[in-house]
Amino acid sequence: MSSTGAPSPNLPVTSRRKWAKMSLTLLLVPAILFVAVSGFLTLANLKEEPVREAPTQRLLRISVFDVAPVDFTPFLSAFGSAQAEQEVMISSEVSGRVVEVPNIKVGSRVRGPATVESAAGTQIQPGDTLVRIDPETYNERILQAESLIAQAAVELERVELQERNNRRLLLQKQQSLDSVKTQLDTARKLFEQGAGRESDLRRAELEYQQVEAAVLQLTIDIGGADIARKTVIARRETQERELALVQLDMKRTLISAPFSGRVSELMVEQGQYVRPGESLVRLTNLKRVEVPLAIPIGQSQEISKFVLAGTFPAVELAENETAAPRWTGRITRIAPVADPTTRTVNLFAEVDNDGSPDPLLPGTFVHARIRTSLRTDVLLIPRAAILDGTVFVVVADSTGETVAAADRDITAIDKAETVPDSPSKHLGVTARRRVKLGQTYRGLVEVVDGLQPGDRVILTNLDVLEEGASIEVIAHQTVESEIARDRIPVIELQSMPELPQTGIQD
């Protein structure tokens, strides 16, 4: 290449072509960039300013809750399973073959013992027969025990007769002993004086010894008779007790109803061999049924006061939370101890089924509502209206006019519109207030401080609502409407129809 930058004429043809293409590229790139920038600036200068619309005001359509004092009765809610106040599993107390099962089936009604007044006096009539066990074995045992008792009586009589005879003989021998003692003394005295013979003395001594031995033997026999008599008497008493037990077992072969009720389970058939302790029949008294209800300890205190005062709160029972009350009863007692695990205490609701066409059956799982004390002049609002301990309320607009209620479909509550300001609309203004809350009643909560009767608490559009926002009220709600919407109410307004009496005096 030459010093002027041009390709040397001595270079090959291929090298000179590459050098020409490179030079052309370096000249075209700046030219293309210049044309592009010039075109962009020209188009930007041709763009027109957009037409700005007049400012609009955002109007929120909301629903409000009208705050008003109410009188109401709270309910305690609980679940439990009904159980019979009187239920027993009747078991066999003796062994044997079942020879009779009367025509009883599950659900059959049986009669218990009854007191019968007659000319002979008051008598207890046994209940209906449930099962009869073969009594023949026990009859034989009774006869055997009676025979043994009779034998003991004969033996005792023999012992006593022998004792009487021995006592008579003893008396005779004692008299003979006195006589031979006199003869022995005479013979000894004559022998000592030399007037008697030694053989006579020895004969008198031998006779005395024989009579003395007989007296001693009779005395021993009389003492033994007393022991024999006591032994026979003890054996006879044992046999008499055995007879009493067998007679009791004989009575137990006939199993009757201990109380009036219904057969809830039958586990025996005729011909079956049963043993002591084997279950035969379950008998249930449906006249009264109890339902244990687990209530939090804090909520049970008020009910405890009622029960201790002798006033038993009414309770309504249904198959589930949403069903209408089907049975009514009363709280009659409270468990003396609480469950430390669940921190609850059991209340016992009693239901009287006597004469009821729709009795509450044991085993039924029920929902219970228990009335508590009447509360008066309480301000309640929906819990959904509360945001971090505050609520939005409707206040007067800038002209001093309050928001007018519009009768509109409640389905349109949650709509927000952006509409031009119109002199035909009355725009309300929102304000935020902090409230102090009390007890909660499911979807409603008590307001202790922060609201006054007549306030209107905003329920909808709370996610976009700000203090001072313009609103239009399109629907009103009250405590009555909130309770009506609740499938499982926990309070009853005083103005609503009365339910069964809250208490029954014992």
Image (cartoon, grey):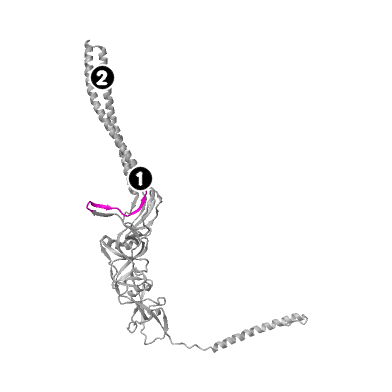
Query: Can residue 369 be spotted in the picture?
Result: no
Q: Which residue is found at the position 58% from the left and 86% from the top?
A: 40
The residue stretch that appears in magenta: 118-137
Q: Which of 497 and 152 is in front in this view?
A: 152
| Amino acid at pointer 2 | Tyr
| Amino acid at pointer 1 | Tyr
Q: How crowded is mark 1: few (under 14 residues within 10 Å), some or many (20 or more)?
A: many
Rendering coords of residue 300 (x, y %): 32, 62
Q: In which quarter of the image is the C terminus?
A: bottom left
Is residue 129 one of those drawn in magenta?
yes
Q: In this view, does 173 lie to the left or right of 47?
A: left
Q: Of label 1 and label 2, which has the lower sequence position?
A: 1
Rendering coords of residue 7 (x, y %): 74, 82
Q: Mark 1 points at which residue?
A: 138
Rendering coords of residue 327 (x, y %): 33, 65
Q: Is residue 25 above or below residue 382?
A: below
Q: Mark 2 points at which residue?
A: 208
Query: Can residue 46 be spotted in the picture?
Result: yes
Q: In this view, does 233 lie above or below 460?
A: above
Q: Is residue 127 above or below residue 37?
A: above
| Image-quadrant location for residue 191 | top left
Counting every numbered tag in the picture gives 2
Rendering coords of residue 9 (x, y %): 77, 82
| Image-quadrant location for residue 4 | bottom right
Marks 1 and 2, how far apart at CA:
60 Å
Q: Which of 91 and 296 is in front in this view?
A: 91
Q: Residues within 10 Å of mark 2 (few under 14, many from 20)?
A: many
